[in-house]
Amino acid sequence: MTYAESARETNTSRFERIVGEVWSGDFSAYNDLFAADAVVHTPFGTFEGRTAYRTYLEESLGVVPDFEADLDEVFEAGETVAGRFTQRGTQTGAAASAGLPATGNSFELPGSNFAQFEDGRCVEMWTIWDRMEFLDQLGLFPDSPRAFARLLGLRLRSRLGSRRSDRSRHGAA
């Protein structure tokens, strides 16, 4: 893209490229769309820095390689862009960090996204969708309180384990 084309690009068109290109695995314009210190909030955590968010996206596409998202509505107000989207795909890979086995099941969920831009790059983004509905469509939502507690315990142990290993690397007890 030339400088003149970039200058004509709006935050809405940048947002559309994030959802249409980046979320589908086309990272060719990724560094042009996200600031180096961008912060992205998702139902699976907050990712600080565009490298951390790209790693999350690459891992997610490994779990759901046929992922796609369609924008249903987009609104721009100043440097903020908001959009409603529908996402769909088939979970064929395991999400080890989330403790989720591969299911082969498909999902389709609505979601919302809010992105803040500065100097033509996304500096902060909030992606919101129903994680419980996602688990239910994948057949992973626990069917009993005991199973739910077990799933919650796995998630807590995986998060606490990573924090413990972080502390031990930094010399904390």
Image: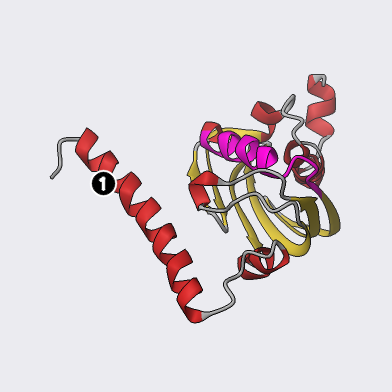
| Residue drawn 80% across the image and 42% down it | 66
Q: Position of residue 49 (x, y in %)?
A: 50, 36
Question: In the rendered view, does 146 fall on the left or right side of 160?
Answer: right
- Residue with the mark numbered 1: 164
- Residue lying at the far bottom of the rendered structure: 145
Question: Which quarter of the figure is the N terminus placed in?
Answer: top right
Magenta extent:
52-68
| Residue drawn 72% across the image and 45% down it | 92
Please tell me in which quadrant of the rendered image residue 122 appears: top right
Q: Amino acid at mark 1?
A: Arg
Q: Position of residue 12 (x, y in %)?
A: 79, 47
Q: Nearer the viewer, residue 98 or 43?
A: 98
Is residue 22 visible in the rendered image? The answer is: yes
Q: How many marks?
A: 1
Determine the main secondary structure of the stretch shown in magenta: helix
Please tell me in which quadrant of the rendered image residue 21 appears: top right
Above or below — where is 1 with respect to 90?
Answer: above
Q: Position of residue 53 (x, y in %)?
A: 57, 39
Q: Position of residue 27 (x, y in %)?
A: 72, 28
Question: Which quarter of the figure is the C terminus placed in?
Answer: top left
Asked if residue 97 lies in the magenta stretch, the reply is no
| Residue drawn 74% across the image and 51% down it | 104
Above or below — where is 152 with respect to 8?
Answer: below
Is residue 46 visible in the rendered image? The answer is: no
Please tell me in which quadrant of the rendered image residue 112 appears: bottom right
Above or below — where is 5 with respect to 113?
Answer: above
| Residue drawn 23% across the image and 33% down it | 169
Q: Secondary structure at mark 1?
A: helix
